[in-house]
């Protein structure tokens, strides 16, 4: 038997097929673009996700029909927080408002004023990237669209609807809506009421490793699948990645350098730290939670700067590595889209500080990479302040292909970072594992094991003191810039 994982990312759709032993057999990808109609806005058309899913699964069918025929379980992973609005006939009302959209900052303040108990129930600060504040924004600015809402789904759950006909979400993805009572793993009537909704507008909830439905017969025929496979609850992209990388035991974690950046650690109990803007969510497997520090522009920062100077990001990072002699003098604050952890500030913006006549693209590219490393340290700091112990870290995401970037992060964290053997152990792979568990009833922790490690990146002791000093300047710059902006 084979098992399929589908990830609905921000920049693309990915599908991975694994066997019963959990070995990856084949994969396919399709690119996506996003729209930024106004500053701070970020949207995608859900129809583009479905087109991408059809493309990647058609590709696997065409290249490996015998493997596709044996699919027994499907898992879903996806970008979190996006608001997919459906009317009573399940038609999409408007483009989905995404996780990195910050238009609803005022509505976040309004939610916390309306419900002083919000942080205790949700375990999280109201942030504009979350789903619930977006609905309040729509109520004010697009009342005709708001009036048509019958269901609100997350991105991967909209794809589930098209695959199975079921309105279902999982606990980990639902945690990022700001409508879930995270400690008790259920929708909160009080949180929903703040945005004028009831549980009728919500999907049903299952654990990420549980069955949420079966693939429609018409789609089984399209892809040549012999028997309708079960579709697992799946998970938000980071929880699914944790299942792929084996970060399911307490204290195990990963650092992700994707479009956004994440420092993730698994917990045995619900452990919020709202003062530090830590995300405290349900994990994608039962009776497990996790914490995340999230910053919005990781590889996005390097991609932005590379475009600005007319270079390819991979080439730029290689140029930085070839000329690296230690910490630079330039400092970059990576707040291009506002920031979550630790500042919860949608109005924060990126900055270069300490530029000189010698500040060429290589030096500024190094500053960008170091700024992202300092953002990871910010996340580590607030997780530790919450009483969390991070025992082990692994690296995932496209940015982790840069050895120097991982060395910077290991040095500023003063922690070793394990790099898995070649292979993508991200959301699609973790989703495939969840599909296997749902289909077979296997113990999640026996399936979600750590991959083999190819190497371990250790801190550069000779640079530790200089990076510690630079990090303190980095923190002071944010405070100084924000103070000056507030007085302007």
Image: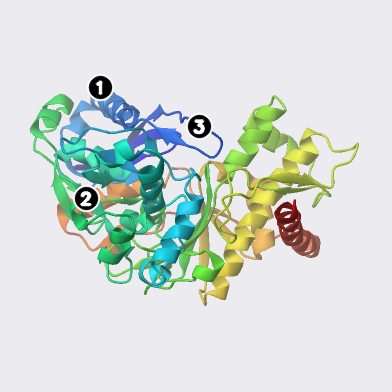
Determine the image quadrant of residue 59: top left
User: In the picture shown, does residue 17 fall above or below 263?
Assistant: above
In this view of the protein, which residue sits in the foreground, 407 or 100? 100
In this view of the protein, which residue sits in the foreground, 467 or 85? 85
Can residue 372 be spotted in the picture? yes
Q: Is residue 335 left or right of residue 432?
A: right
Distance from the alpha carbon under mark 3 to that under mark 1: 35 Å
In percent of the image, x 67 and y 31: which residue is there? Answer: 306
In percent of the image, x 57 and y 68: which residue is there? Answer: 382
Percent of width and height locating residue 441 = 16, 59
Mark 1 touches mark 2? (CB < 8 Å): no
Percent of width and height locating residue 280 = 42, 65
What residue is disc 3 on? Answer: 36
Q: Is residue 458 left or right of residue 423?
A: right
The tag on residue 62 is 1
The quarter in which the N terminus is drawn is top left
Distance from the alpha carbon under mark 2 to that under mark 3: 27 Å
The tag on residue 201 is 2
Q: Is residue 357 left or right of residue 61?
A: right
């Amino acid at each position: 038997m084979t098992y399929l994982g589908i990830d609905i990312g921000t920049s693309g759709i990915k599908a991975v097929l694994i066997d019963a032993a959990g070995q990856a057999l084949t994969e396919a990808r399709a690119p996506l673009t996003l729209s930024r109609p106004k500053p701070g806005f970020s949207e995608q058309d859900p129809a583009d996700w479905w087109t991408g899913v059809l493309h990647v699964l058609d590709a696997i069918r065409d290249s490996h029909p015998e493997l596709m025929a044996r699919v027994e379980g499907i898992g879903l992973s996806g970008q979190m927080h996006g608001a997919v609005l459906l009317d009573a006939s399940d038609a999409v009302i408007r483009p989905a408002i995404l996780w990195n959209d910050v238009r609803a900052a005022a509505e976040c303040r309004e939610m916390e004023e309306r419900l002083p108990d919000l942080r205790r129930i949700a375990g999280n600060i109201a942030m504009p990237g979350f789903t619930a504040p977006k609905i309040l924004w729509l109520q004010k600015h697009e009342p005709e669209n708001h009036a048509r809402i019958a269901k609100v789904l997350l991105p991967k759950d909209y794809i589930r609807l098209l695959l199975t006909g079921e309105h279902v979400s999982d606990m980990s993805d639902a945690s990022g809506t700001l409508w879930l009572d995270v400690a008790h793993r259920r929708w909160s009537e009080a949180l929903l009421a703040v945005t004028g909704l009831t549980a009728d507008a919500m999907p049903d909830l299952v654990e990420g490793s549980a069955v949420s439905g079966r693939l429609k017969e018409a789609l089984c025929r399209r892809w040549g699948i012999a028997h309708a496979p079960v579709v697992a609850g799946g998970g938000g992209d980071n929880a699914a990645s944790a299942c792929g990388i084996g970060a399911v035991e307490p204290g195990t974690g990963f650092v992700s350098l994707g479009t956004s950046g994440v420092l993730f650690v698994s917990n045995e109990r619900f452990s919020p730290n709202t003062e530090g803007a830590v995300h405290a969510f349900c994990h994608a497997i039962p009776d497990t939670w996790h914490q995340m520090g999230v910053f919005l522009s990781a590889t996005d920062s390097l991609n932005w700067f590379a475009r600005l100077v007319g270079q390819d990001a991979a080439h730029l990072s290689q140029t930085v590595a070839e000329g690296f002699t230690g910490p630079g003098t330039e400092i970059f604050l990576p707040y291009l889209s506002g920031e979550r952890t630790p500042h919860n500030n949608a109005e924060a913006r990126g900055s270069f500080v300490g530029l000189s006549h010698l500040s060429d693209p290589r030096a500024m590219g190094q500053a960008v990479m170091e700024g992202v490393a300092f953002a990871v340290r910010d996340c580590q700091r607030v997780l530790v302040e919450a009483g969390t112990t991070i025992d082990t870290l692994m690296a995932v995401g496209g940015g982790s292909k840069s050895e120097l970037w991982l060395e910077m992060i290991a040095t500023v964290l003063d922690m070793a970072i394990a790099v898995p053997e070649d292979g993508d152990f991200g959301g699609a792979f973790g989703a495939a594992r969840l599909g296997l568990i749902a289909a077979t009833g296997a113990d999640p922790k026996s399936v979600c094991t750590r991959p083999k490690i190819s190497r371990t990146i250790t801190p550069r002791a000779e640079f530790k003191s200089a990076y510690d000093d630079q990090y303190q300047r980095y923190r002071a710059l944010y405070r100084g810039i924000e103070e000056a902006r507030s007085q302007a």
